[in-house]
Image (cartoon, rainbow, N blue to C red):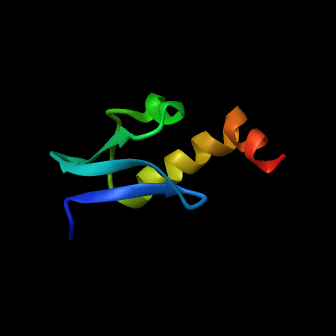
Amino acid sequence: MSDTYIIEVHSDAVGLVVRDRGGFRFFSSEASFASLDGHLFRNPRAAEEAATRHYDTSNLGRRRRC
């Protein structure tokens, strides 16, 4: 298993997670995902799901669909 994974939402890279004690720590590459910075997730998939929820519940999702 890798120690670092790119997190994508709708084919856009929004951050990465790095293996840390107890899980994977999120680092955003997009300012709109900064609220997830430093969060610890049990695995990369959980981080990706959180990023997708963030996108879908924010104005980001509404803007992109227009």
Residue 19 rendering spot, x and y as whole percentages: 20, 52
Q: Residue furthest bottom?
A: 1
Residue 26 rendering spot, x and y as whole percentages: 34, 42
Side of 40 relative to 53 (left or right): left
Residue at 60% over, 46% down: 53
Residue at 42% over, 60% down: 45
Residue at 49% over, 56% down: 8
Q: Nearer the viewer, residue 24 or 32?
A: 32
Q: Nearer the viewer, residue 44 or 8?
A: 8
Which quarter of the rendered picture does the N terminus lie within? bottom left
Residue 15 rendering spot, x and y as whole percentages: 40, 46
Q: Residue furthest left?
A: 21
How many numbered markers are drawn?
A: 0
Side of 58 relative to 16 (left or right): right
In the rendered image, the vertical position of residue 1 relative to residue 42, given as above or below:
below
Side of 53 relative to 62 (left or right): left
Q: Nearer the viewer, residue 35 or 22?
A: 35
Side of 62 relative to 53 (left or right): right
Residue at 31% over, 50% down: 17
